[in-house]
Amino acid sequence: MRRMARRSPSSSFAGTPSGVLGRLTPAARFSAYAALGLGSLWFGFPLLWMVATSLSPVEQTLSFPPRLLPLSQHALLDGERREVTLDERVREPSVLLEEVGGPRAGLRTLVPERSFDERDASRRRVASALPGDWLVSERSASSKSQQRNPRRGIAAPSSIETEVQPRWENYPKAFAALAGKSMEEIEGFVGGTAPLSSDAEVSFFTFFVNTLIVCVLGVIGTVLSNALVAYGFARLAWRGREAFFALTLATLMIPYPVLMVPLFSIFQALGWVGTLLPLWVPAFFGSAFNIFLMRQFFRTLPLELSEAARLDGASEFRIFWQLILPLSRPVLAVAALFHFLYAWNDFLGPLLYLTRRHTFTLSLALQSYQTTHGGVQWHFLMAASTVIVLPVLLVFFFAQKTFVQGIATTGSKG
Amino acid sequence: MKRKDWRALATGLAFSAPWIVGFSAFLAYPVLASLFYSFCDYSILQRPVFIGLGNYRELLHDEVFWLSLRNTLFYAAFSVPLGVLSSLALALLLHLPLRGRAFFRALFYLPSIVPVVASSMLWLWIFNGQYGLLNWLLRPVCAWFGSTPPAWLADPAWAKPALVLMSLWGAGNSMLIYLAGLGDVPQELYESAAIDGAGTWRRFWHITLPAISPVLYFNVIMGIIGALQVFTQVFVVAGGAGGNANPLEGSPARSTLFYSIYLFSTAFFDLRMGYASALAWVLFLLVALLTLLARHIAGGRVHYSA
């Protein structure tokens, strides 16, 4: 009866009284859409902002107002059209002066018109500025030389050409930064002026491969071991089965911190600390939740299937492998998916066990970069974060059904 | 037992073999060992020395332990109820016959599967006091009241509320669990209640809520367990909030020194594994206690139908 009353979530029944609210009045409908809009801002905008920042030039992340689109500005500088950064809005009539001699020759500064002394021979007038104009400086590939001696000029707002220009180069630069390259090396590397550091052993790709190893081996282990064990619990009658299963369920309550210290000493004794092994080997020995999940599914398959196969003389393992497993793809997919997400997200495990950089996973590499050199390199941090999020998004879009299925099972069995 | 039973037992054990190893090595032994360590003086470098209740006695006078407990309970007290309410509200909203709700479901769910380190970086950026998006939005509003917005994760008074807000970004997961529960509520119940003249509120209170009470209960319990153990996002934002931030000291000003952070640093930086095990067991007891409390409060109100 209950099953029959259930409607598939995708079927739309607009117009008929539905759920707790009954028929929606226009006002209720309007507020519902308004709430959806607010919800979309809260859940969606931060992700959009992450991608936007990852494509922005560094100075745009540190200026106001914040811009969603990565922009580039071009203006006339000493008679040539160049890419510039907008440094400062001119507030009062001013002049741009250049040091003529001395150690600071060529340095240009903006000085208010009223405090400019015509007789000062050490500085020459380059340009005049009116309120509303921009003090601009040339944007060079290398941020280092830009800081030392920027070529500066004055540009009227109307003469500045603004266009949208995503900085895809932030991504390779962020990879290099995470791999331990210094800012000088990174800017030089992309600009092609400085040689690549010879210490290129640990690359971003290594972190990616490490994460992938932990995920893929963990998923294989999860699917194989839990299916095998759950089969024993679901479809074989043996003495002690119920007691062992009850014990298994009871372990779901144990918080990880209780296990943390002894697990560490086990892996220490095995000599596995500093390797990826503690992160995927345990997956080959089952987990209480997945055993439970798969057992519930296996129990729904008719027992007659196995009986028939047994009569034909098939071994128990063959029944499991050739009959039950192929029928259980949905639940195997759920377990595989959730283990993949877990392993991809895991931070505490890598933090505990990975001691050397070349074994780091993506999450650990990102966090370690952020605490040691992150500072204000928000465009790099967001680029690296985007790269870590991307596989999860892809998996989500290709496996939406499995997600919904998995979550529905998790919750309703509470 | 007959020969047949022995054979059945052997087959059963053969299938369970991976789990017998896993259960013993990665659960049973660690639980017992950690209980034993909690009564010991133990750094991983030397053999554990039994000291009786010494660790637990020390806990009572450990100011940092109480501080981390207070911080964690503060976080849980806000993030769990707010999380439950907001995800339930979103589920009710998305259960309405609205256009594009499949899209909104997916969108609202997505943040909950974003890897925690990445989402923590993102929120560090959004909460950044100087250049962050949030404060850019808040600055005019605050200026109107003659004040300035806080530095959030870099401000001892605002770091925990900021973490609570971050936790609400991941409400999509429980939202989907509620939606699955709502889908199971028999439609006829609403229809007959409507004929009997029951208003929206009464329909919610007498039909929806009892029907989804197992799911609600499940989410509250999972929420409590998760909130008391929260680690990664705290570790990342406390280490990245600027200055000489140290996640192990709960920067800023120990305001994010959460229970699991204290446990982690006690075990792996001070190498006081015995004391850390005692901390872990206190956490275990606390989780069990709160779960029982939730069960007691829920009492007979959780209805398991069918």
Image (tube, coloured by chain):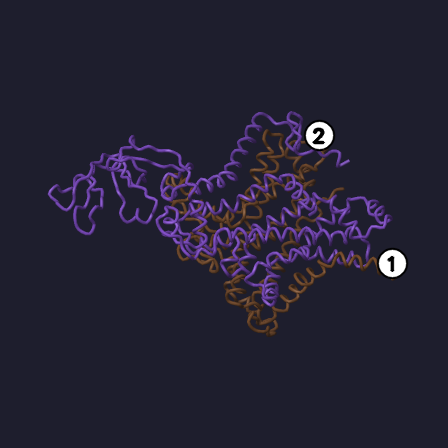
Chain colours: A purple, B brown
Q: Is residue A56 above or below residue A183?
A: above
Q: On the rendered image, what quadrant is the C terminus of chain B found in? A: top right
For marks 2 and 1, the one nearer the N-term is 1
Residue at figure coordinates x 68%, y 55% from the top left: A286
How many neighbours does mark 2 have within 10 angstroms: few (below 14), some (14-19), or many (20 or more)?
Answer: some
Spot occupied by residue B93 in the image (x, y as percentages of width and height): 59, 35
Q: Nearer the viewer, mark 2 or mark 1?
A: 1
- Residue identified by numbered label 1: B4
Q: On the rendered image, what quadrant is the N terminus of chain B found in? A: bottom right
Q: How many numbered marks have been drawn onto this rendered protein structure?
A: 2
Residue at figure coordinates x 55%, y 52% from the top left: A211
Residue at figure coordinates x 59%, y 42% from the top left: A395
In front of the other: B33 or A350: A350
Question: Toward which corner of the image does residue B145 lie, by quadrant?
Answer: top left
Left or right side of A207 for B301: right
- Real-space Cα separation, disc 2 to disc 1, in angstroms: 55 Å
Label annotation for residue B191: 2
In front of the other: A164 or B149: A164
Tag 2: amino acid: Glu
Instruction: Name the chain letter of the residue that bears numbered label 2.
Output: B
